[in-house]
Structures are given as C-alpha cells and as structure tokens.
Amino acid sequence: GYLLNDASAALENFKRLVQEFPETPQALASLDRYKNFYSFPGDEISRARVYLQHGRFKNVLEILKDKTDRESLALRAEAFCGLKDYTQAVAILEGLTKEKDKGELRLRLGEVYLTGLAEEKGIQLLEKLIEENEGSRFGCLALWDLLNYWKKREDMEKAKIYSRRLREN
C-alpha cells in the first residue's frame, strides 16, 4: 500500500509539473527520471510534445518509434525536421497527406519542400492550399510562407504579389 501511494503521488507530481511548467528544466528532468519507472498508457504523445518543444528531437523519435497513428507520425515528421532530416520528414508527411486533412500537414509538407528538396512541388502545393482555403488560417499561412520564400530569393516582384494577396485575405 505505502509504495503504491508513493508511486501514485510521484506520478501526480510529475504530471502536474509537466503540464504547468513544460518549459522548465525540472519538467524535463522529471520526464527523464520517471519515464523508465512508470508506464503511462497513451502518454507517449504528451511526453513527445514536451521533448519536441525543447528541441530534444531524438527523444521524440525514440518514444514514438513503434507508433503508427497519425498524431505520432506527424510528431515524428516534426522531429525529423528539427534534425534537418527533411527526406525522412517528407516520406512521413507524403504518406499522411494522401488522406484528406484540414491543411496543417499539407502546409508543413509544402514548407519542407521549400527547404530545397522540391521547391517547385512546394510552391504548387501551397498554391493549391491557398486556393482551397481562401481567407482561412491555412490559406493565410501558405501565402505567408510563399511571401517569405520569394523574399529569401530576393524576387521582390513575386514577394509583392504574395504580400498584396495576404493583405486581401
């Protein structure tokens, strides 16, 4: 009984700390300390999100290595982006975007394409997203991505076009 109560209290403390202060070193230390001692069913996603927020991308990949659900795969893709392994990220995102999504994963795939992997594909994907989501959050974010893409390439004529389109949305 006593040990079980102790473990239960430690678990509650761990969850509270991570939820209230995910950015603190104490939360990450708690995560590391308790991850091997307690099993939290379905809590891999929560742990992976905390690690992702803190740039601990290899931990995300380790935690979710055997997971095949959409959310886990999307988090793995983000971790691969964080590690600048865009080829792995694209492989996951292309698989996930075969099914219809609200736009978030296609937006991220377009952004990854623009890193230099397939820039023309990225432009086309983001343009399609803009067309399908005129005036919505995803449409505006795609416009913003393309505006920044053309600015970085110092093509101010194209950048002005996206700037104007963004203002109109």
Image (spheres, rainbow, N blue to C red):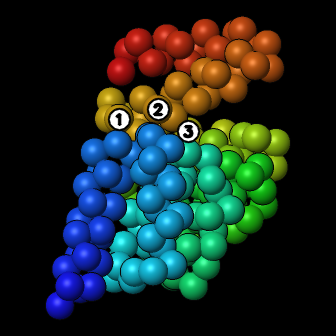
First-in-chain label (2 vs 3): 3
Q: Amino acid at mark 2?
A: Leu
User: Where's the C terminus, which quadrant?
Assistant: top left
Look at the numbered disc 3 and give the secondary structure of its residue: helix
Residue 40 left/right relative to 126: left
The label number, if any, that marks residue 30 in the structure image = none
Cα–Cα span, label 1 and label 2:
6 Å
* Disc 3 packing (10 Å; few <14; some 14–19; many ≥20): some
Disc on the earlier residue, 3 or 1: 3
Determine contact: label 2, label 3, CB under 8 Å.
no
> Quick check: marks 1 and 2 in contact, CB under 8 Å?
yes
Judge by depth and name the residue closer to the eye, 86 or 100.
86
The residue sitting at the front extreme is 2
Give the label, 2 or 3, closer to the camera: 2
Q: Residue at x 42, y 29 (%)?
A: 140
Q: Is residue 43 left or right of residue 77?
A: left
Residue 74: percent from left, percent from top: 52, 63
Amino acid type shown at disc 1? Arg
Which residue does the numbered mark 1 point to in the structure image?
137
Q: Which mark is residue 141?
A: 2
Residue displayed at 42% across by 35% down: 139
Q: Position of residue 164 (x, y in %)?
A: 49, 11
Does residue 166 show up?
A: yes
**Residue kind at label 3, given as amino acid type:** Glu
Estimate the spatial distance between the alpha carbons at disc 3 and disc 1, rounded to whole Å.
14 Å
